[in-house]
Image (cartoon, rainbow, N blue to C red):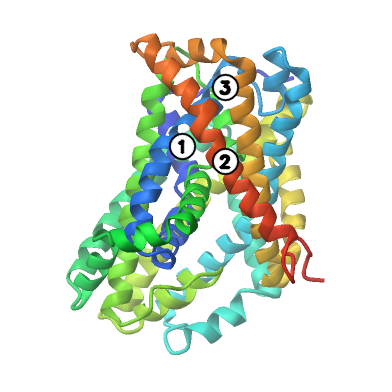
Amino acid sequence: MTERETWATRAGFILAAVGSAVGLGNIWQFPFKTAEFGGASFLIVYLVAALGIGLPAILAEFVIGRKANLNTISAFEKLGYKEWRVVGAIGLFTGFWILSYYSVVGGWVLRYIGGSLTGAYFAAPAEYFGQVSAGMEALALHAVFMALVVGIVAAGIEDGIEKATKLMVPSIIVILGALAVFAFTLPGASAGYAYFLSPDFNALSENFAEIVPFAVGQAFFSLSLGMGAMITYASYIDGDQSLFGDGITIVFLNSFVGILAGLVVLPLLFAQGIDPNTSGAGAVFISVAGAFGDIPGGQIIGFVFFAVVLIAALSSAISLLEVVVSWAIDNYDVSRPQMAVGLGGTIFLLGVPSAIDSAWLGWFDTLAYQLLLPLSVLGILVFAAWVYGAPAIDELMKGSGLGEGVGLTWLWLARTLVIVAVVATLALGLQTLFLGESPAIIPPL
């Protein structure tokens, strides 16, 4: 077994964790989920969910990872609960599953970077997306994106992931900030700000039961919870830094990037008279891409926009591959580069159906969102809050300088409200998967 690596700096860990959280879920999914569920009404519920539910859940993963200093499966055994390794295995499988189709979407982004410079998709964005989103070209770009991810992870924690995310995360914030300033100058953008930032409390109360589960699910997805990523990244912490402080910083920065993305996407769509209430895998590649053809300098703006989407996609993808690589190098005497190449190749093969037919991508995503993620988060919370208990508080408070009352508040919040929210989200997901005339659990054969 090779010697276990650690982060070189605290900032490196925070930026890597933020990079894992900030991905397509923030720049694509968050603006369109906001549009689909009532604009500012969804935003309010999401922010409450991210702080009140997402923060306790991410702290639970941090506690397990740092205390054990091992991968997401072996951590439970080291803590003395061998039978709970199945929870870590679900998280590892979830990250493996998600990366297989996430890489396909990353390939789409690569294609749109080139298409922005040539203006290839401006005239007919829907037709262009249909041509490049599935088939041999999509498969080839899936391979290219996966090769980029493998290359970064193979370089190691300090020289690969930490150095990459120290460059990626600030770049995402700076470029999105510049695009938000540009969107502010467009005529008609004010309607987008009103929709995004002015809540309709009547609409919120009328649709509260529908909005809440999706806002909670979005908080989990955008914070990379339930994928083994946060347990794995916390396992590389060397020292008594405040997990509580790190968790708040990560949740804040992640939410900030999501809001920043909304300040780019929604004003841009309203300025061009495009209906923002669009969902599906092609949303950002059709609606937003179509808007670039109608604004001055659209080719350059499109290139910059999809470049930042690529950076965000890579920063998340490397964390998902690291989950399985960490498990492998902790348990087998094989080098990191060999494991990164071998496991990356296996994930690429799992993603082949999603690259050939986007219906498969939708099926993979539905299972991840409705079943795997909430099931994994639920297992982690039950273990940390009800099984591990008091030692979890001790680990959380280490280096924080806070009183024990903060730890007890976290413990009981996780034991009650957070678990109830996750159970409700999982129940709704199971209903979607198994009930109804066309159960979503059936693959597109």
Q: Amino acid at mark 3?
A: Ala
- Badge 2 marks a residue whose secondary structure is helix
- Badge 3 marks a residue whose secondary structure is helix
Few, some or many C-alpha atoms within 10 Å of disc 3 (few <14, some 14-19, many ≥20)?
A: many
Mark found first going from the N terminus, 2 or 1: 1
Mark found first going from the N terminus, 2 or 3: 3
Q: Which residue is mark 1?
A: 53
Label 2 vs label 1: CA separation?
9 Å
275 left or right of 388?
Answer: left
Asked if disc 2 and disc 1 are in contact, CB closer than 8 Å, the reply is yes
Asked if disc 2 and disc 3 are in contact, CB closer than 8 Å, the reply is no
Q: Which residue is mark 2?
A: 422
Residue 48 percent coordinates (x, y):
37, 43
Quadrant for the C terminus, please: bottom right
Residue 230 percent coordinates (x, y):
54, 33
Residue that appears at 72% across and 38% down:
90
354 left or right of 83?
Answer: left
Q: Amino acid at mark 2?
A: Val
286 left or right of 369?
Answer: left
Residue that appears at 77% across and 56% down:
349
416 over 125 or under it: above or below: above
Q: Which residue is mark 3?
A: 385
Could one spot residue 99 in this view of the protein?
no
For the residue pair 71 and 299, the one nearer the viewer reads as: 71
